[in-house]
Amino acid sequence: MWLYLFAVVGYLGVLAAVAVWRARRTVETTGEDFLVAGRTLPAHVLVFTLLSTWIGSGSLFGGAGLGYRTGLAALWQSAGAWVGIALIFFIAPRVRRLAQYTVPDILEMRYGPAARVLGTIAIVLSYTAIAAYQFRGGGRLLHLVAGVHPDSGAVITAAFCIVFTALAGMSSVARLDVINGVTMLAGVGLAIIYLLGGAGGLGGARAALRPDQLTVFGSLSPAQALALFLPTMCLLLGEANMYQKFFSARDERAARVAVAGWIAGTIVVESLIVGIGLLGSLRLPGLGTADSEAIVIRVAVTALPTLLGMMLLAAAAAIIVSTANSMLLSPATNLVRDVYQRLINPAATDRQIVVYMRVVIVGLGVLGLVAGSIFPTVLAMALWAYTMYGAGITPALLAALIWPRATRQAGVYSIAAGMAVTLGWELAAVARGGIAAPAYLLGLQTIYPALIASVGTLVGVTLARRR
């Protein structure tokens, strides 16, 4: 077992060593370096940092666990990202052309200061929750490989990610994601090859699996499948980390090329992770919902040869840490840039921006640790965060980029409506029976009323004001 722990700790040690080495060679002294890497990132770096940011504990635990329980139907959640990235391909150059720092920058350009404030609140709530389940995923990883209590493991993971992100900034985080992306691809790729070989190839696996595991919907209804698809797609279309990294691109062409590579990498990695969950159901049958979410880690320590298991665990560590770093960096950027610099101290120096960024990263990390104890599963937390952001921000953000007719009032009211309905629907569902994944009320998952409220308000107010 100590070899597995060595794989995780050793990998994180390599990341830390490279980060220190980079810091000695290139000291990030300006706010623009820390926030958007000086707008110098080439396409190949953007591909890996976008991939490493998107593939996180939601895929590693939520997606793999869903694959274990429902089979290929788990790809409905992943497919939301694929469609979202494909749509992003057409607007990435336009985003880079704006040369802003954050998503709330875009919202204020179009809808005014109120939209900036509401957008910042939605990002902080959503991304703190996403960072929280990265910490929780790290706790599960350390529990399974070293017997560390999951809560203690979450604290250890959070401490590493907080310190790493606070010291690194965008430039170092993005370039280290090249290492994370390669590790991720190698770990899950070799694992799936071994599991398929053990199952007798594709034919043997198909014969051994339940018929419903190989169908389009599996045990899900079409409405349930769509409730997995929509929050993921809506989050990705407005994903603040993605926009911040487009703002970090060297030029418009680098942004567009990166999106093409990103969609290919995401399809491959997310399909492989779901495949590990699916094939893991043959090796380790009978797991409940919570235990099945750790199927990738369980496969690594019980079903793979030691070397392959170590590689898969290193990939798991890469998935968790890379996403946690970005989910701390993005909301910290929003709070410092969109609240402190924009509303409190417009004359803030580069040194003040970097110092406050580091303080806010620590504060958000601590808040994420507390938030991680609220939800029963990673999937429940992921869908809540995706819905809050996807319904609250994405419709107004896309309208700001592609619908010139949308009015200032419509954008503000749309953000407020999406956020309010998400919170209200989830709280009402909790009052009726506890947090689930996804939450139900009146037979509907949260994404449906929240998205209808946001889009309906955006269109309705715009048309009413135009008359």
Image (cartoon, rainbow, N blue to C red):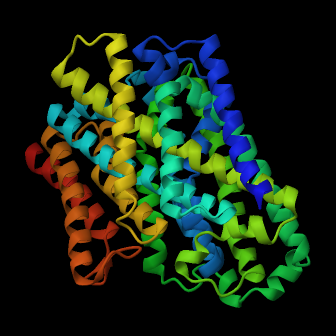
From the viewer's perspective, tell me whether residue 439 is left or right of residue 212. Answer: left
Q: In which quarter of the image is residue 200?
A: bottom right
Residue 330 visible in the shown view: yes
Considering only vertical position in the picture, is 374 above or below 188? below
Tell me what residue is drawn at x 23 percent, y 39 percent.
Answer: 405
Q: Position of residue 107 (x, y in %)?
A: 27, 35
Q: Observer-nearest residue: 438 or 81?
A: 438
On the question of residue 467 being in view, the answer is no
Drawn side of residue 40 relative to residue 120, left or right: right
Query: Which quadrant of the structure image shows residue 408?
Result: top left
Residue at 64% x, 11% y is 25
Query: Which residue appears at 59% of the width and 51% of the height?
Result: 55
Q: Compared to 386, does 214 lie above or below?
A: below
28 vs 466, nearest the viewer: 28
Residue 302 as seen in the image, left or right of residue 271: right
Q: Which residue is drawn at 46% across and 29% down?
A: 166
**Place of residue 222 in the rendered image (x, y in percent of width and height, measured from the top left):** 48, 80
* Spot occupied by residue 160 in the image (x, y as percentages of width and height): 54, 40
Q: Residue 207: x percent and y percent?
A: 83, 87
Q: Quadrant of the N terminus?
A: bottom right
Give the mark count. Answer: 0
The answer to whether 195 is drawn above or below residue 464 in the figure is below
